[in-house]
Image: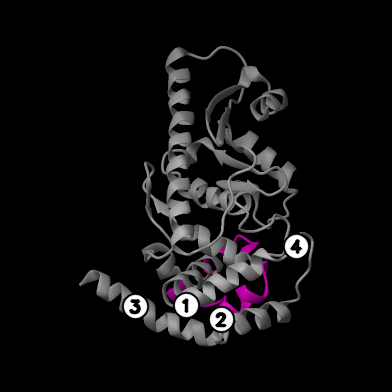
Amino acid sequence: ELLTQINEEFSATRTITNIDKPFVIVLVRARPGALDPAIEKRYQLVVKKAATFFKGMQTNFLEFVKQARIETQAVKYPLAALIFESDRHFDAYTARVTEDQSGLSSPNVAAFYDLQTNRLVIRLSECTTFDTPLHEAVHQQVYNRGILQRFAPIPSWFNEGIATGFEGDGERVRSGPKSISDRYGQMALRARVVTWKEIVARDEPFQGDVLAAEANGHAWGLHWLLVTKYRAEYNNLVKHYASKKPLEVDRPDERIAEFEKIVGKTVNELQREFQMELPRAMARRKN
C-alpha cells in the first residue's frame, strides 16, 4: 500500500523499488521512460544495497537499545526511504516538505528524516558511504519503535547525540554510541562557540549551517559520556523524554532544570568531565 502511494505520487514510470520489511526503498528517477539496461541494473543494485544496509543498521540499533535497557516496540508501519537521482529534484522536494524550517539550506542537506511523512529522503550520491542516511535512519528507528513520540519536545541534543553514535563504512555499521568517534570527538574538543549548556537549553545551534557542526560534536560527546559513565541516569533520562507528549512546549530553563535533576550534576560539570575523560579514553584505546 505504501509503495502504491509513493508510485502514485512520483509516477511508477520514474521509480525503481525494493521491499525488505519493514523497509520500502524507492529510487525516484529524474525522468520517466525506459532506461538503458546497464543503468537500470545499477539502480536496482542501489535500492537492494540500501535495503541491506538499513536492515543491518536496524540490527545494530536494536542491540544498543537492548544493552541500554531501553523499552521498544515493534515497527507498526512500513519505513520508507526515497532516493532522488537528481540533486535538483531532491532540493525542490526538501524545500517543499520542510519549508526550510530546519534552518539548513537545501543544497547543504545530504539526507533527512521527515517527521511528518515518516520518510527518509536521500540523495543518490549518498548511497555509496551511507554516512548521512545512516544518521537519519537512526532517527526513524527512534520514532517508530515507541522510544520517543513524534512532534514531542525532544531536545535536539538527544536526537543528534544518539544518531551520531552510529558510524558505518558503506557496507555495514561498524560502531555504536558506546564507541569513541574520532570525527565527533575532535569536533567536541575543538568547539569554541557553542557550549553543552546551550544545546541542552535550546535547539537553535542545530538549526543553521554555521553552528551545526559544533552542536553535533557536543551532542555526540554528551550522549557518549552518559551511556558510558551514567547508565542509570541515562535510562531515566530516556524514560523522561519518552513521557513527553506531542506539541508540548518546554522553556530553556525547564530543560536545564529537568536534565540536571535527573543526572544529578550540572551541565557545566559534565562538560568539564568530558574534556578530561575523552582524551584519557582515546589514549587507553591507542595503547
Which quarter of the rendered picture does the C terminus lie within? bottom left
**Residues at marks 4 and 3 touching, judged by CB atoms closer than 8 Å:** no
> Where residue 28 appears, x then y in whole percent?
60, 28
**Residue that carries the numbered disc 3 in the rendered image:** 279
Q: Residues within 10 Å of mark 1 (few under 14, many from 20)?
A: some
- Amino acid, disc 3: Pro
Q: Earlier in the sequence, mark 4 or mark 2?
A: 4
Image quadrant assignment for residue 179? bottom left
Q: Is residue 260 above or below residue 150?
A: below
Q: Residues within 10 Å of mark 3 (few under 14, many from 20)?
A: some
Q: Nearer the viewer, residue 75 or 37?
A: 75
Image quadrant assignment for residue 30? top right
**Residue that carries the numbered disc 4 in the rendered image:** 245
Q: How is the image coloured?
A: one colour
Question: Which residue range is magenta in the image?
Answer: 188-214
> What residue sits 67% from the left and 83% below the top?
257
Image quadrant assignment for residue 31? top right
**Residue that carries the numbered disc 1 in the rendered image:** 230
**Residues at marks 2 and 1 touching, judged by CB atoms closer than 8 Å:** yes
- Amino acid, disc 1: Tyr
Q: Would residue 50 be counted in the magenta stretch?
A: no
**Residues at marks 2 and 3 touching, judged by CB atoms closer than 8 Å:** no
Which quarter of the rendered picture does the N terminus lie within? top right
